[in-house]
Image (cartoon, grey):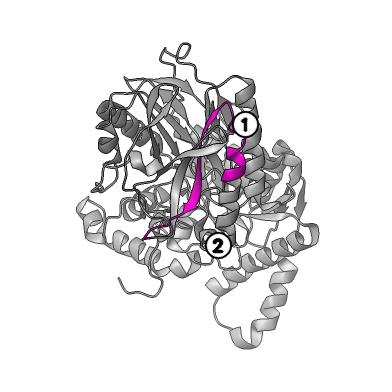
């Protein structure tokens, strides 16, 4: 039985309880063995929890307790163990449990240290390759990255796939915690096809389906035959179990539709929001600032889908610069979704602050300072409501704005989760259209209007930034593709615009260091994957 689990990082007892329940189910179904993902005991990634000896003790104790339940069934499960030799103090291990004992340990060979990964910080690499024997089958067991020996932007010196191929396995089982991003599926299929071809045997690929802060794991587990065709699959973004029977599952099946990016993005973001609330122990009560713009509208729709519309409070905070259309659109959205909403004008707060700072501002012209007072007045109100009611504030900043600093610290950057912080503005419009695929949920007037912060008369985002379809192209080339200014200019982009955009990105790292956690859906997000020096000149 394949167990596509959703472990909570650090919850050893809770994870163990769910694991034991799955083992009992597998035993009741007369399964020969039951498989769990990478680091199922402690969740992935445990980060610096691994530095605490007491945490390691609890993980090892849990494995020993689970081993006692392996009578009559073989268990393959991911956990950690101490390294009694030289090197890093721990191994990332696949334990093979049988007849009440740990009968074998397979250590992870390739320890990724790029993007979100920091495994070399904690683990020692495997140096021994072997098969395990289960019911007459010679089985290769590997852990996540061990399949990716030549499928990154670099090729590892060591090749677990080739080393195991020399041993001629009958079956390969890969347990993993493989993070999600929108372009991952095609690459993962290439990795699986390559492994099957090199080893000439079927492959069981078992991923966790989980969300840990903003890192998503999509599941997508399955069994592949010797032609790398999927014969059994598990769903995306949900816990599931499936029983594999080679006498039954021997015909290729229709795989998931991986081509509809917006359908997958919507599913991923809803999953990420719901999981964040559940795992952080928050009551499913949220609020957001509703402006009548595309960003807050998409967040309101996502939050309603994740938590229930009745649990999402929309707070409209118009100023003298807010258009009547924006207020009407925001009200219409709340009525369509079924959200409770309040209209709280900020004029009195704005005027009060201007009166307080008048001795310093004096008669200087209206500027970004007055714009930011509006944003920060709204942030203050939202945080006050959050504190008083216990509702969790959802941030509404998108990736385009975060990239160039078109956000206000302690204003619209307030909030505990930035669900669309890895979604470009142009993607947001496509996502809004997907949300409206069957009926109008987000008013089309919101989707069709020119984007504006509405912090001064007749303001448009294009007054300060390039048009988003151009801006997002340059941002993606710089952030995801990691091209420098000159390389981007050589592709035909205007040099002045490129220089300005890249300089804005570089100058606004200080804001992103203070931002809420972002749900990662691209290859390079701001919370986890992109690590740039804050004090630097480049």
Report crowding for label 2: few under 14, some 14 to 19, many 20 or more residues within 10 A (C-alpha).
few
Q: Is residue 80 magenta?
A: yes
Residue 192: numbered disc:
none
The mark closer to the camera, 1 or 2, is: 2
Quadrant of the image containing the N terminus:
top right
- Tell me, yes or no, if residue 297 can be seen here: no
- Residue extent of the magenta highlight: 63-87
Q: Are marks 1 and 2 in contact (CB under 8 Å)?
A: no
Q: Quadrant of residue 333?
A: top right
- The first of marks 1 and 2 along the sequence is 1
3D distance between C-alphas at marks 1 and 2: 28 Å
In the image, farthest residue toward the right:
388
Q: Quadrant of residue 361?
A: bottom right
Quadrant of the image containing the C terminus:
bottom left
Q: Which residue lies at the image location 34% right of the left edge and 38% below the top edge?
A: 147
Residue 151 position (above or below residue 320): above
* Secondary element at tag 2: helix
* Secondary element at tag 1: helix
Residue 290 percent across, percent down from the top left? 66, 52
Q: Count how many numbered circles sit on residues in the image.
A: 2
Along the line of sight, which residue is nearer the eye, 41 or 271? 41
Residue 364 percent across, percent down from the top left? 55, 82
- Tell me, yes or no, if residue 71 can be seen here: yes
Residue 105 position (above or below residue 223): below
Along the line of sight, which residue is nearer the eye, 250 or 525? 250
Residue 377 percent across, percent down from the top left? 67, 68
In the image, farthest residue toward the bottom:
359
Residue 152 percent across, percent down from the top left? 29, 45
Residue 22: numbered disc:
1
Q: What residue is pinned by disc 2?
A: 53
Q: Which residue lies at the image location 80% right of the left edge and 62% below the top edge?
A: 388
């Amino acid at each position: 039985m394949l167990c596509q689990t959703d472990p909570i990082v650090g919850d050893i007892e809770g994870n163990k309880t769910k694991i034991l329940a799955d083992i009992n189910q597998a035993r009741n179904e007369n399964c020969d063995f039951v498989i769990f993902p990478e680091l199922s005991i402690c969740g992935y990634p445990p980060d610096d929890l691994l530095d605490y000896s007491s945490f390691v003790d609890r993980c090892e104790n849990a494995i020993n307790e689970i081993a006692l339940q392996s009578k009559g069934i073989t268990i393959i499960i991911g956990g950690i163990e101490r390294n009694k030799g030289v090197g890093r103090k721990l191994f990332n291990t696949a334990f093979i449990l049988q007849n009440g004992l740990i009968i074998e340990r397979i250590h992870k060979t390739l320890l990724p240290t790029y993007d979100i990964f920091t495994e070399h910080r904690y683990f020692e690499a495997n140096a021994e390759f072997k098969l395990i024997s289960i019911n007459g089958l010679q089985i290769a067991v590997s852990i996540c990255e061990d399949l990716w020996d030549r499928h990154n932007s670099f090729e590892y010196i060591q090749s677990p796939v080739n080393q195991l191929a020399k041993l001629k396995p009958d079956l390969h089982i890969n347990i993993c915690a493989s993070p999600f991003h929108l372009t991952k599926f095609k690459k993962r299929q290439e990795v699986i096809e390559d492994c099957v071809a090199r080893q000439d045997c079927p492959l069981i690929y078992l991923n966790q389906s989980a969300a840990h802060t903003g890192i998503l794991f999509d599941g997508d587990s399955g069994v592949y035959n010797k032609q790398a065709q999927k014969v059994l699959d598990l769903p995306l973004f949900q816990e599931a179990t499936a029983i594999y029977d080679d006498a039954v599952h021997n015909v290729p099946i229709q795989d998931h539709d991986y081509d509809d990016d917006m359908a997958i993005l919507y599913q991923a973001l809803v999953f990420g929001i719901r999981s964040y609330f559940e795992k952080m122990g928050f009551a499913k009560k949220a609020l957001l600032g509703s402006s009548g713009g595309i960003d807050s509208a998409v967040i309101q729709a996502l939050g309603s889908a994740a938590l229930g519309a009745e649990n999402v409070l929309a707070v409209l905070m118009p100023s003298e610069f807010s258009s009547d259309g924006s207020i009407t659109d925001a009200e219409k959205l709340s009525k369509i979704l079924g959200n409770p909403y309040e209209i709280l004008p900020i004029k009195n707060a704005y005027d009060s602050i201007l009166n307080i700072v008048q001795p310093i501002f004096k008669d200087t012209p209206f500027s970004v300072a007055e714009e930011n007072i509006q944003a920060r007045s709204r942030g203050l109100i939202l945080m006050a409501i959050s504190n008083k009611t216990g509702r969790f504030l959802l941030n509404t900043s998108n990736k385009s704005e975060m990239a160039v600093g078109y956000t206000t610290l302690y204003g619209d950057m307030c909030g505990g989760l930035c669900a669309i912080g890895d979604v470009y503005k142009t993607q947001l419009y496509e996502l809004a259209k997907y949300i409206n695929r069957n009926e109008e949920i987000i008013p089309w007037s919101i989707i069709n209007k020119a984007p504006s912060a509405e912090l001064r008369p007749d303001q448009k985002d294009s007054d300060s930034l390039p048009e988003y379809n151009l801006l997002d192209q340059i941002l993606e080339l710089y952030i995801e593709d990691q091209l420098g200014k000159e390389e981007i200019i050589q592709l035909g982009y205007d040099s002045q615009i490129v220089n300005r955009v890249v300089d804005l990105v570089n100058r606004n790292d200080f804001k992103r260091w203070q931002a809420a956690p972002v749900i990662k859906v691209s290859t390079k997000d701001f919370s986890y994957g992109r690590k740039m020096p804050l004090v630097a000149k480049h």
